[in-house]
Amino acid sequence: MFAYELCRRYQRAVNARDMDQILDLFVPDAMATAPISGTLPVREFHLQLFRHNERGMTQLRNVFDGLMGERSIALQFDYTWTREGDIPLVLQGVTIFDLAGTKDKLAGLTMIYDASELRKYLAGQQASHADRAARSA
């Protein structure tokens, strides 16, 4: 399978929030790294991702093929988080996918984006949940 097709399958699986399809694309010990979460096993990373937004959508903008060292491919994307109250937050960034030696699985991913707006969103979301919990107590 071509690296690009693996990445597109990943994008579709994330948009569908399909954990089984996501995990099927990676080697068992794959790790994911992002500015907010740090480095986590792929499963835990995606559970956290899905927990922090009700609906997310990725839109591909460009593809870059790594030519040096281990095989990798990078996708430039717009990632739209849907906040509480249906307020969208759009992040622009790049996800670098490392390919396993067999080239038919992903060995890991690294997301690169400006996390400043996302940090504000997550802080607001935590405050909102705390307010609701205090009111119901």
Image (tube, rainbow, N blue to C red):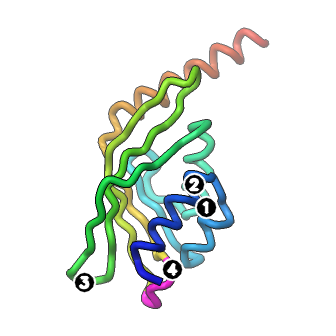
Judging by the rendered image, the residue that carries numbered circle 4 is 105
Q: Position of residue 106 (x, y in %)?
A: 48, 75
Q: CA distance from mark 1 to mark 2?
A: 5 Å
Within 10 angstroms of label 3, few (less than 14), some, or many (20 or more) residues?
few
**Residue at 32% across / 44% down in the picture?**
92
Amino acid at circle 3:
Gly
Q: Position of residue 65 (x, y in %)?
A: 27, 73
Please indicate whether residue 96 sits to the left or right of residue 126 in the image.
Answer: left
Q: Say which of marks 4 and 3 sits in front.
A: 4
Q: Position of residue 5 (x, y in %)?
A: 45, 73
Within 10 angstroms of label 4, few (less than 14), some, or many (20 or more) residues?
many
Query: Where 38 falls versus 89 (above or below)?
Result: below
Q: Quadrant of residue 131?
A: top right
Q: Quadrant of residue 136?
A: top right
Q: Are marks 1 and 2 in contact (CB under 8 Å)?
A: yes
Q: Say which of marks 1 and 4 sits in front.
A: 4
Amino acid at circle 4:
Lys
Q: CA distance from mark 1 to mark 4?
A: 15 Å
Q: Position of residue 110 (x, y in %)?
A: 38, 61
